[in-house]
Amino acid sequence: MSKSMEVNVGGIALRNPILVASGTFGAGLEALEQGVNLGAIGGVVTKSVTTQPRGGNPPPRICETPSGMLNSIGIMNPGVDVFIRDIMPQFAQLPCVRIVNVAGESAQDFEMLVSRFDDVSACDALELNVSCPNVSGGLDFGIDVALLESLVNRCRQRTRKPLWVKLTPNITDIVPIARAAVRGGADALALTNTYLGMAIDWRRKLPRLGSKLGVGGLSGPAIKPLSLYAVHKVARAVEVPIVGIGGIRDADDVMEFIVAGATAVQVGTSNFADPSAAVEIASALQSWIDDETISDLASYRQSLIVPRPHG
Ligand SMILES: Cc1cc2nc3c(=O)[nH]c(=O)nc-3n(C[C@H](O)[C@H](O)[C@H](O)COP(=O)(O)O)c2cc1C
């Protein structure tokens, strides 16, 4: 019999710690259609949903880089009304935990979005995207301690659902921001979103992305060491569970995040190479834990041995 990999993240039980990350898996419907066994992963986080439909940024919106990719999608989505009416009934059928990621341009937007989903039973938890580098003002809340605490607090008043807050790494020190989200009432922290970057076609003297200023968000294996460090720092500073995100490709990567302090992880860019990536990672993790003498993953969580300085 397989050992349990169940974890509890801020009020929700996941069958295993592997989720798919916002913006890299739609609402899971295409994967389901293609026969990807979503019953084998912990959960799906939707693309960010906004109050109004968004067409996204001008193309090109994606650019491959060594060990990663840049994107400047700009939160293209149909808006909350269409999402709840047309997508939610199908999202509700997913055989795993269903998390809706929301993004607002103002505190009122965020409050409206979380209250709209509060009555939607198939939404198991909400993830606040205060960290999008690809829309104007997308990072405002994620880089200001007072603003973020107040935002999370206001959202907390509007919903009984577990509230996860997804942080940006585009800040000098992520720890005060993480603490502010927790003071505001976050049940869990997801980190990180993408890292600001750009790519240049130097011969044409043009950015490779079509967004304003040619800026995008870097994701994929290139950011794993950076996100691991963020998880390590935040895990030592807050009490709530952490969901690690950044460049995860295999079960070893997952274990690195767990040892750094994560309770669960999200797989993002890897889904573009293989929509079954998260399922395969979950299966590899299960085989590994079944072969080990340990009884559960919790014994590895935040178990990093930090060498003492000499002298
Ligand atoms: C094409 C693309 C679109 C994304 N869209 C969103 C989004 O709408 N909302 C959000 O919170 N994060 C979004 N992200 C960020 C991912 O959820 C994730 O935090 C990031 O890509 C790092 O994980 P990875 O290295 O495994 O991809 C997007 C990432 C990519 C690559």
Image: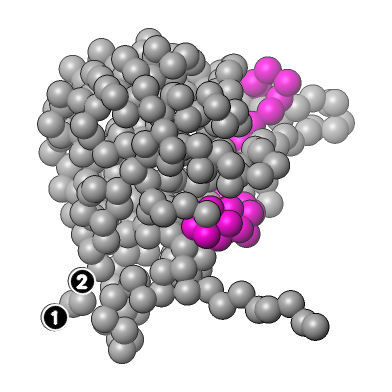
- In the image, what residue occupies the spot 58% across and 53% down? 230
Q: Which residues are magenta?
A: 210-236
User: Dot 2: within a 10 Å radius of its alpha carbon, few (fewer than 14), some, or many (20 or more) residues?
Assistant: some
Q: Which residue is mark 1?
A: 1
Q: Is residue 109 left or right of residue 8?
A: right
| Res 113 quadrant in image | top left
Whether residue 72 appears in this view of the structure is: no
In magenta segment, residue 88: no
Q: Amino acid at mark 2?
A: Ser
Is label 2 in a helix, a strand or a loop? loop
**In the rendered structure, which amino acid carries the disc numbered 1?**
Met
The answer to if 219 sits in the magenta stretch is: yes
226, 268: nearer the viewer = 226
Q: Residue at x 84, y 26 (%)?
A: 204
Q: Where residue 31 sits: x, y (%)?
A: 28, 44
Asked where in the image residue 198 lies, by quadrant, the reply is top right
Residue displayed at 51% across by 43% down:
179
| Relative image position of residue 304 (x, y in whole percent) | 53, 73
Distance from mark 1 CB to nearest ligand 1 atom below 8 Å: no
Residue 307 x, y percent position in the rendering: 66, 79
Where is residue 251? Give x, y as percent: 42, 69
Q: Looking at the rendering, in which quadrant would you find the C terminus? A: bottom right
Q: Is residue 69 left or right of residue 157?
A: right
The reply, left or right, for residue 205 in relation to residue 114 is: right
Q: Main secondary structure of the magenta part?
A: helix
Residue under numbered circle 2: 4
